[in-house]
Image: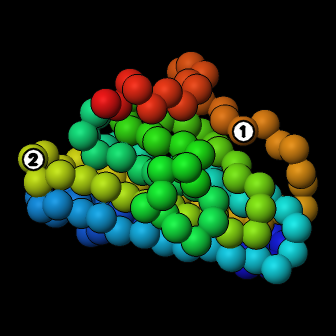
Amino acid sequence: MDLADVRYITSLEYPQTYPVYDIDYIWYFTSNQSGTFVVRFLHFWTQAYYDFLLIGTGFNATNETSEVYRLDYLFSPNTVSVEGPVMWIRFLANAGVSKHGFFLQIERTSEIGMAKFYAINHLYSLNRSFYG
């Protein structure tokens, strides 16, 4: 992505509920310019504690050390930002219950050092032990 480029992504079948089967879907965003990826949550509704939107850096979205955010319905932000040339977004859902999912706007900006997490109701720091 170039600076000021904007992309939009949604969960499967949005705005309907996402399918009731195991989902593991990954999007990668790359740029050859320094800057920050800004993700705006235009709509976000997943099953709390079970279905997650993970956001991280690098090319290995299955490596937990590259994970920056792990979000579900209870921890739903307005905006998150990730610095670096590569960002990934991974949607994990189980086959139990489906919700409406998400509609995200991704933008590339030249700003460095932006605040990392703005929450609608409260600030949440990633705590991996909370999720097991």
What residue would you read off at disc 2? Answer: 96
Q: Give the amino acid at mark 1.
A: Lys
Q: Is residue 127 above or below residue 29?
A: above
Q: Secondary structure at mark 2?
A: loop
Instruction: Return the x and y of residue 17 as percentages of the image width and height.
Output: 21, 57
Q: Quadrant of the C terminus?
A: top left
Q: Alpha-carbon distance for marks 1 and 2?
A: 31 Å
Mark earlier in primary sequence (1, 2): 2
Which residue is painted at 34% across and 31% down in the image?
A: 131
Tell me if mark 1 has few (under 14), some (14-19) or many (20+) residues whose alpha carbon lies within 10 angstroms of its own. some
- Secondary structure under tag 1 reads loop
Regarding residue 8, the answer to whether it shows in the image is no
Q: Is residue 75 above or below residue 82?
A: above
Q: Which residue is mark 1?
A: 116
The amino acid type, in three-letter code, at marker 2 is: Gly
Pick the residue in front: 71 or 79.
71
